[in-house]
């Protein structure tokens, strides 16, 4: 699984002009699933992301985690993270998991994070979504469960 993690002042996601998820201070997660991913990959990212020390302390150092600052998470499914652009000009998305498998792991990831006491909002899996965020810093990280 791949996750793009963005520290945000606020964020929201809309589907057909209706807001389906929004957060205040916290993290926006764009989460992609590939064919080989399992519950173990979802667990790895769910355990890692809420504890990343990417929020500033009173001295301006990144020493606090999402849990430390009692932040929220906006989780968005993002199959295009597995787009292959090595050939031609149109991305190939064969690396992305089929929707039936991907939705299960996406939902498992979200539940695992919620089980840690983090408030999680989500987009609508498979829908055309518009995501707005104010990236704080900016701070953006890319995590891959296969690169441990």
Image (spheres, rainbow, N blue to C red):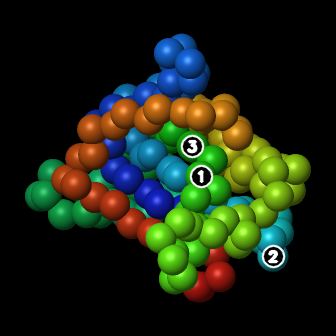
- Residue that badge 3 annotates: 75
In the picture provided, is 25 more to the left or to the right than 87?
left
Say few, some or many: other residues with alpha carbon within 10 Å of mark 3 (under 14 / 14 to 19 / 20 or more): many
Name the residue at 53% across, 66% down: 90
Residue 110 locus on image (x, y percent): 68, 45
Check contact, mark 2 vs mark 1: CB within 8 A: no
Residue 72 locus on image (x, y percent): 47, 37
- Element under label 2? loop
Q: Is 73 drawn above or below residue 37 in the view shown? A: above
Say few, some or many: other residues with alpha carbon within 10 Å of mark 2 (under 14 / 14 to 19 / 20 or more): few
In the picture provided, is 142 more to the left or to the right than 113?
left
Q: CA distance from mark 1 to mark 3?
A: 9 Å
Residue 122 locus on image (x, y percent): 61, 34
Q: Is 1 drawn above or below residue 76 in the view shown? A: below
- Residue that badge 2 annotates: 36
Can residue 64 be seen? no
- The label on residue 78 is 1
């Amino acid at each position: 699984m791949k996750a793009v993690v963005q520290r945000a002042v606020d964020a929201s996601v809309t589907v057909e002009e209706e807001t389906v998820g929004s957060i205040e201070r916290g993290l926006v997660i764009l989460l992609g699933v590939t064919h080989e991913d399992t519950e173990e990959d979802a667990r790895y990212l769910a355990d890692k992301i809420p504890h990343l020390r990417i929020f500033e302390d009173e001295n301006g150092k990144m020493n606090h985690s999402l849990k430390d600052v009692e932040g929220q998470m906006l989780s968005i499914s993002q199959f295009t993270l597995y787009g292959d652009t090595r050939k031609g000009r149109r991305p190939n998305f064969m690396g992305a998991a089929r929707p039936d498998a991907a939705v299960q792991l996406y939902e498992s990831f979200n539940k695992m994070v919620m089980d840690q006491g983090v408030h999680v909002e989500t987009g609508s899996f498979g829908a055309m979504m518009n995501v707005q965020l104010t990236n704080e810093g900016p701070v953006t990280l890319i995590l891959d469960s296969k690169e441990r």
